[in-house]
Amino acid sequence: MSQLNELVDELKVKIIQALGLMDVKPEDIKDDAQLVGGDTGIDSIDVLELVMMIEKDYGVKIESKELGAKVFASVRALAAYIFENRRKKA
């Protein structure tokens, strides 16, 4: 389970960097809090940036709006999706 928690923490940093959230610290993003439209102010345009970052950094595609809604429900949901679908790096 610790690998998943490490991924959650890593994603918080990457989300802040990818979206240039200057006023947000990783500890400000709650693991299970609503990610899009929540306290972080992440909107649908930001989600596109995150989808591209996730594809580039993790090799994981999010191919539908329905899937995106589930995956971006929270940082923990996003981490779980990446964890399950990440291409195994040899």
Image (spheres, rainbow, N blue to C red):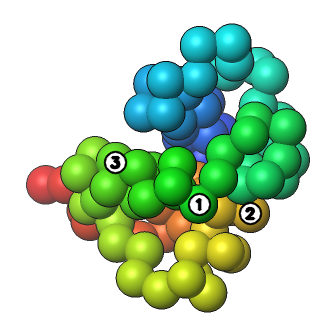
Q: Which amino acid does label 3 sit on?
A: Met
If you read the primary sequence from the N terminus, does the residue marked by circle 2 or circle 1 appear first?
Answer: 1
Q: Disc 1 marks which residue?
A: 44
Q: Disc 2 marks which residue?
A: 73
Is residue 74 rendered to the left or right of residue 20?
Answer: right
Residue 7, image x, y percentages: 54, 40
Q: Disc 3 marks which residue?
A: 53
Is residue 19 rendered to the left or right of residue 74?
Answer: left
Q: How crowded is mark 3: few (under 14 residues within 10 Å), some or many (20 or more)?
A: some
Residue 25, image x, y percentages: 69, 15
Q: Distance between the residues labelled 2 and 1?
A: 12 Å
Q: Is mark 3 on a helix, strand or loop?
A: helix
Q: What residue type is labelled 2?
A: Ala
Which image quarter holds the C terminus? Answer: bottom left
Quarter of the image where one finds residue 2 = top right
Q: Residue at x 78, y 53 (%)?
A: 37
Q: How crowded is mark 2: few (under 14 residues within 10 Å), some or many (20 or more)?
A: some
Residue 54, image x, y percentages: 37, 53
If you read the primary sequence from the N terminus, does the residue marked by circle 3 or circle 1 appear first?
Answer: 1
